[in-house]
Image (tube, rainbow, N blue to C red):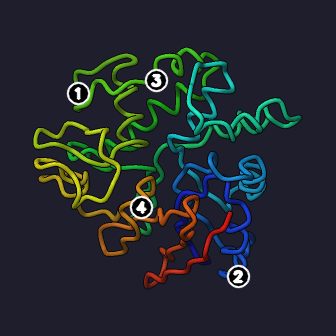
């Protein structure tokens, strides 16, 4: 069985299928690790959702920030901006409720003990161990899978609190967890999340550094797979697999094999 990590698809269904063909992906034997942001910006978000859902246990996907935007829109939460126009095409379709209910039951973090690998969409605060990451993810997952989940979506948006504290509670705690796992890129010297810089790390303001360079980090010793940061590009080493290679921006969609010596496979993207 081959296991592949694939970065943000964002509705780019055709490159996704070309990549799977290039991998000779067999859903009866192989498994996909999808880093989230299945939807938005690309032209075929609904088709992407339907296909990934059809793969069942052959595809593990964690929630990304754009997936959460879709959940918010589906529940009449006021999410403004032209970048969400493609999500409206999913709403009102015959299978919309089925897809939304499937999506909100996806995890925010996935861990394989056998591979000693954890996948999230964006990052992990340095104060969290792997066990703590999974525990915090489950807190949000339980809320999203409850009937009252729209109540949390109303309060999900916002950049505060921006630093982890075990004393956080209620929606403030849940909002920080969501922001860390689905939005984080840079931290300041006090380990506060910086939401303003999305470009390459070497172009960031003084005092900011990528979340994975913060020290000491309790998650060290486990390989982390993530996406979200197209300006970072591909990273493949013993500690990190960064998979967002900017498909939706016309660059590439990339798969990294996880269960063997890392091998990188990419396709060019024209959506």
Comes first in the chain, label 2 or label 3 = 2
Neighbor class of circle 2 (other Cα within 10 Å; few <14, some 14-19, many 20+) is few
Reading the chain from its start, which is encountered first: label 4 or label 1? 1
Seen in the picture, residue 8 relative to 92 is either above or below; the reply is below
Q: Residue at x 54, y 72 (%)?
A: 255
Tell me which label, 4 or 3, sits earlier in the chain: 3
- Quadrant in the picture for the N terminus: bottom right
Q: Mark 2 highlights which residue? A: 24
Q: Is residue 60 above or below residue 108?
A: below
First in residue order: circle 1 vs circle 2: 2
**Element under label 4?**
strand
Q: Residue beneath label 1, please?
A: 166
Q: Secondary structure at mark 3?
A: loop
Mark 4 and mark 3: Cα distance apart in space: 24 Å
**How far is mark 1 from mark 2, CA to CA?**
45 Å
| 3 vs 1, front mark | 3
Residue density around tag 1, few if under 14, some if 14–19, many if 20 or more, within 10 Å: few
Q: Nearer the viewer, residue 108 or 130?
A: 108
Q: In the rendered view, would you say 52 is above or below 29?
A: above
**Marks 4,3: beta carbons within 8 A:** no
């Amino acid at each position: 069985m081959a296991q592949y990590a694939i970065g943000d698809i964002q509705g780019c269904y055709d490159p996704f299928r070309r990549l799977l063909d290039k991998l000779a992906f067999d859903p009866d034997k192989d498994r996909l690790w999808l880093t989230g942001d299945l939807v938005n910006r690309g032209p075929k978000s609904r088709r992407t959702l339907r296909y990934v859902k059809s793969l069942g246990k052959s595809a593990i996907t964690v929630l990304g920030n754009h997936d959460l935007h879709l959940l918010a829109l589906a529940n009449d939460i006021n999410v403004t901006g032209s970048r969400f126009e493609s999500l409206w095409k999913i709403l009102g379709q015959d299978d919309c409720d089925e897809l939304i209910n499937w999506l909100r039951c996806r995890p925010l973090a996935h861990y394989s003990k056998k591979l000693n690998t954890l996948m999230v969409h964006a990052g992990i605060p340095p104060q969290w161990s792997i066990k703590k990451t999974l525990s915090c993810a489950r807190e949000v997952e339980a809320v999203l899978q409850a009937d009252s989940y729209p109540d949390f979506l109303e309060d999900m948006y916002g950049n505060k609190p921006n630093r982890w504290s075990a004393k956080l509670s209620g929606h403030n705690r849940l909002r920080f967890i969501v922001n860390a796992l689905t939005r984080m890129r840079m931290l300041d010297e006090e380990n506060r999340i910086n939401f303003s810089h999305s470009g390459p790390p070497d172009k960031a303001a003084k005092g900011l550094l990528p979340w994975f360079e913060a020290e000491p980090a309790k998650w060290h010793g486990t390989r982390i797979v993530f996406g979200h940061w197209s300006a970072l590009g591909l990273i493949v080493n013993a500690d990190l697999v960064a998979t967002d290679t900017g498909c939706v921006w016309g660059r590439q969609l990339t798969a990294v094999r996880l269960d063997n010596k890392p091998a990188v496979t990419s396709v060019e993207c024209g959506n």
